[in-house]
Image (tube, helix red, strand yellow):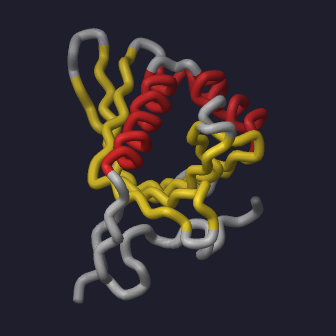
Amino acid sequence: MGQASGTEHAAVGTGGTGSPPVPVSGDLYAEVMTFYAWQMRRVDALDIEGFAGTFTDDGEIAHSDGQRQRGKAEMLAGMRAALPRYRDITVRHWFGHVLVEPDAGDPDTLRVSYYSLVALTDREGKVRFQPTFTVDDVLVRRGGRLLTRSRLIRRDTPAESV
């Protein structure tokens, strides 16, 4: 999949004109939200194999720090290396403002954009938050189920002053 291209990760919901996206059916929106609930419960439970299983075999994650993992083997290696960071804490991923747009050229492809907040709770119940992120995903339907083909994670930064 190479570098994230403007086509692969075009901003969802802009339609190039600043107009709101065309609404998807309630059933499709619920399916996407259920998919994310399942996917994030895998990662929050540190079930890295289950999380990797929610991606296509050639799936890709581009992290905000520039790190990129292509394919399940690279994803699993990266997640295994990160596991010590999550010792003695509970992680929860929270998504909001989820926009879903079908790909005009492929009915089995969805472009999804959302905001992400990650909460970390230690054994004493103290909660801290990671910076917020904007995430752009490309979901594909394979064998009747949704999978993530690509994920671009961008750390939120203040807008330039006008």
Q: Is residue 113 left or right of residue 103?
A: left
Dividing the picture into quadrants, the one containing residue 48 is top right
Q: Is residue 51 left or right of residue 130?
A: right
Q: Is residue 116 left or right of residue 161?
A: right
Residue 156 image point, x, y percent: 36, 60
Residue for point 47% across, 18% down: 45
Figure quadrant of the C terminus: bottom left
Total marks shown come to 0
Residue 103 image point, x, y percent: 55, 66
Query: Who is closer to the viewer here, 9 or 126?
Result: 9
Question: In this orientation, does residue 54 appear?
Answer: yes
Residue for point 59% across, 45% down: 148
Query: Who is closer to the viewer here, 135 or 122?
Result: 135
From the viewer's perspective, is residue 147 above or below residue 105? above
Figure quadrant of the N terminus: bottom right
Dividing the picture into quadrants, the one containing residue 90 is top left
Residue 159 image point, x, y percent: 29, 75
Residue 42 image point, x, y percent: 50, 23
Question: In this orientation, does residue 130 appear?
Answer: no
From the viewer's perspective, is residue 49 above or below residue 77? above
From the viewer's perspective, is residue 134 above or below residue 92? below
From the viewer's perspective, is residue 28 above or below residue 120? below
Dividing the picture into quadrants, the one containing residue 65 is bottom right
Residue for point 35% across, 54% down: 25
